[in-house]
Image (cartoon, rainbow, N blue to C red):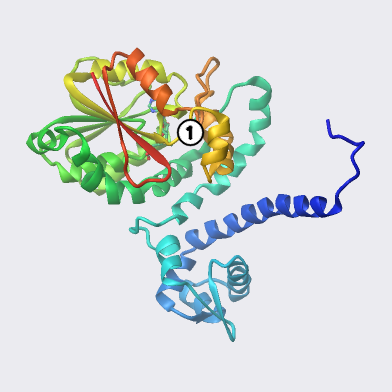
Amino acid sequence: MTDDSQPLDFDKLKEFVEHVFGFLSGAVVSGMIHLGDRLGLYQALRQAGSVTSEALAQQTGLHERWVREWLRAQAAARLVMYHGDGRFALTPEAGLVLADENSPAFAAGGFHALPQQFAVLERLPAAFKTGVGLPYDAFGPEGAAGIERFLAPWFRTFLVPLVLPALDGVVPKLQAGAKVADVGCGAGLALLEMAAAYPRSEFHGYDISQHAIARARENATRAAAGNVTFHDANGDALPADASFDLVTTFDCIHDMTHPATVMRAIRRALKPDGTWLIADINAKPTFEENLERNPMVAMMYSISVLSCLSSALSVPGGAGLGTLGFSEPLAREMTAAAGFTRFHRHHFDNPVNAYYEVRP
Ligand SMILES: C[S@@+](CC[C@H](N)C(=O)[O-])C[C@H]1O[C@@H](n2cnc3c(N)ncnc32)[C@H](O)[C@@H]1O
């Protein structure tokens, strides 16, 4: 209940209205980033240098009036520089973030599945009423493509050169020929990066999303990766045969309806001296700490409602951890309950993820 006995502070009211509309501004500008990425406008701008809307429209084969309005929106949002005389340009930094798919700073992939993410808003009111959310497949094929493009810069840049060598004894095993599983593998980029680096090893990806597995198989065919197999985890689950040297889970434990069951399955799949690498969101144990210490907290809780919590509650009785629900203390507790005895946290320069090396 609001306190109506207090007189209204009109400065605060104005400030709050601006605060609220700031989010609408962020949402519609995000839509424009999606279009710029999808239509190749950022890449064309980067190639062109300082350019007019006419030249950019010609270069991209698009209608000039639409390109001009988009450029003006981009300049107003300070994503594109306006040089006067109808000329627009990307700074070198903006070029890396918005137009260079191979840069570790590339962020435009995070806007790929925006239409599908916003479309589920039509279905979420029902989830609030029934308590049951939507699995990742609710976002369609573009959802799987969006996650791939969102997380790809990290996999391409850091996984093989930085993260795997930090794990105790893992790289020599991979060089000699090891058996690896990536559980919740999505479109398979992490596995394909590892498979290319270690051709003597055998790699298996598991996911419950049909769209992710279909895309992962296409990616494997395109990469001509002969040492990678993708499995639909609904019917073809991780075998309980203690045959794996390494299991990885990237940003998916908090999305699972039954993470404790999956953890026990990983324990059974691993060799006695095997390793489980967990990368998950760097969440704090309490809401208060997340609120205080995480600058991306509003975005993360919102993404949780749109996708992570929704996935983790997509069957009745789901665990419902959500984006910021798998903190280090909980990871320690749950892995110990699943039969793991060793737990080591690594500190890589990644503002979003925490990395745990867990062993039987
Ligand atoms: C945020 S995505 C991360 C995908 C991938 N690891 C990556 O980093 O690109 C989470 C994935 O976990 C998958 N997932 C959720 N529950 C799962 C389960 N029980 N077993 C396997 N995959 C699961 C989802 O289908 C989705 O593809």
User: In the figure, is residue 116 to the left or right of 254?
Assistant: right
Left or right: 321 in relation to 176: right
Ligand 1, seen in the image, is in the quarter at top left
Q: Nearer the viewer, residue 6 or 78?
A: 6
The amino acid type of the residue labelled 1 equals: Tyr
Mark 1 CB near ligand 1 (8 Å cut): yes
Q: Residues within 10 Å of mark 1 (few under 14, many from 20)?
A: many
Q: Where residue 42 sits: x, y (%)?
A: 47, 67
The quadrant of the picture occupied by the N terminus is top right
Q: Which one is in front, 351 or 179? A: 351
- Based on the displayed image, in which of its 4 quarters is residue 66 positioned? bottom right
82 w.r.t. 151: above or below: below
| Residue lying at the far left of the rendered structure | 176
For image coordinates 35% across by 13% down, the residue present is 337
Residue 90 in sight in this render: yes
Mark 1 — residue? 136
